[in-house]
Amino acid sequence: MSPFPGEPSTPGHRSAGPGDEISAEEPSPGGDARPSARVLAGGPVAEAILADVAERVSALRGRGVTPALATILVGDDDASAGYIRIKQRQAAELGFASPHEHLPAAATQADLHAAVAAFSADPAVHGLLVQHPVPGHLDYDRALQSMDPDKDVDGMHPLNMGRLALGMPGPLPCTPAGIEALLAHYEIPVAGKEVVILGRGATLGRPLAMLLAQKRPTANAAVTVVHTGVPDWPRYTLRADILIAAAGVPGIITPEHVRPGSVVVGGGVRYAGRRLLPDVDESCARVAGAITPRVGGVGPTTVAMLFQNAVTAAERASAATAG
Ligand SMILES: NC(=O)c1ccc[n+]([C@@H]2O[C@H](COP(=O)([O-])OP(=O)(O)OC[C@H]3O[C@@H](n4cnc5c(N)ncnc54)[C@H](OP(=O)(O)O)[C@@H]3O)[C@@H](O)[C@H]2O)c1
């Protein structure tokens, strides 16, 4: 097979929401894994982040502040409701309050904005997320833009993207921040290395490129972003020290795109029903030096970053009130 595939995204597959990973998963047919690479599991990274979050929540509660992460769900999609329940359970375990607004599937854009406005204005709420996707007649981006950016735990508000571009403090996009944390946790050198990202999407590739190019010990990389405008993208991935898949095209990365011994991080996924279809074919484990697993890679770190953003928002709000 040519190392220069150019197939488009598979129609009919829903994009995953940040961290919304379904773990009940059988191996892919024909996925001759025989892994030899070091496996970069997200679970231990997430546990370490969440242990720190729990301590910070406890410190806030000790000062009389209960951090609150509010959620908004529109409609009756089972998967979305399930993701909300998982986040609420995790929030409770960490000591967060988790106020919730469930709007009917027929809710209008004005209803959604009203719910966002109410949580944005509530001083007892520190973090806020609208579960993605919303029903087709609603505009998710407009709802996001109406949110208080300081409460945006997904880190996707345009102001927070601007803060990221300028290196200013603010909530970071969860999946990119989780990938940086994953590489740091496994002590994979990033500074001075060549990182190649396949995909320039707003959720993953673009913010990740900004993050890993920043002047910090766990970043500071030479970052290259490739996409459909670079048809010979394997030329770049084949020289990468760290290859990060962020395309959402199942199986687009195969061993012939991977430099032997390099680090491969699978960020892009699609769902076909409950079946998770990652960008990185499992057989890449035969070539890579280290690789994220098919399930349990960047999903758990994404969720952990959500709570890290929430506790940071609560600390900032509390400090602002005290000051
Ligand atoms: N695991 C998680 O927790 C998590 C969280 C967030 C997102 N994700 C996943 O991350 C992926 C990316 O999401 P996103 O919203 O950032 O991106 P996106 O808007 O879906 O864009 C995909 C990017 O991949 C590029 N691409 C697609 N097909 C390609 C091909 N055949 N050759 C070269 N480049 C190709 C596109 O190039 P063009 O720009 O040229 O079109 C585009 O830049 C999705 O699969 C999403 O589900 C996962």
Image (cartoon, rainbow, N blue to C red):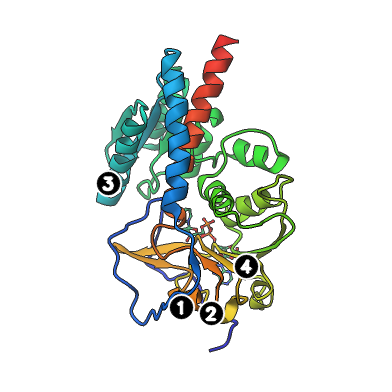
Location of mark 3 (residue): 82
Mark identifier at residue 227: 4
280, above or below 256, in the image: above
Disc on the earlier residue, 2 or 4: 4
Q: Is mark 2 on a helix, strand or loop?
A: helix
How many angstroms separate mark 1 from mark 2 (CA)? 6 Å
Mark identifier at residue 255: 2
The kind of residue on which mark 2 rests is: Pro
Q: Image point 52% across, 78% down: which residue?
A: 254
Find out if the beta carbon at label 2 lies less than 8 Å from the nearest ligand 1 atom. Answer: no
Q: Do the residues labelled 4 and 1 touch (CB within 8 Å)?
A: no
The kind of residue on which mark 1 rests is: Ser
How many angstroms separate mark 2 from mark 3 (CA)? 35 Å
Local crowd at mark 1 within 10 Å, few (<14), some, or many (≥20)?
A: some
Q: Image point 62% across, 67% down: which residue?
A: 227
The kind of residue on which mark 3 rests is: Gly
How many angstroms separate mark 4 from mark 1 (CA)? 22 Å
Residue 104 pos. (x, y %): 27, 38
How many angstroms separate mark 4 from mark 3 (CA)? 33 Å
Location of mark 1 (residue): 283
Would you say 168 lies left or right of 276 here?
right
- Using the rendered image of the protein, determine whether residue 17 is visible from the camera's viewpoint: no
- Using the rendered image of the protein, determine whether residue 76 is visible from the camera's viewpoint: yes
Mark identifier at residue 211: none
Q: Which of marks 4 and 3 is in front?
A: 3
Q: Are marks 1 and 2 in contact (CB under 8 Å)?
A: yes
Of residue 254 and residue 270, the one placed in the foreground of this image is 254
Disc on the earlier residue, 4 or 3: 3
Local crowd at mark 3 within 10 Å, few (<14), some, or many (≥20)?
A: few
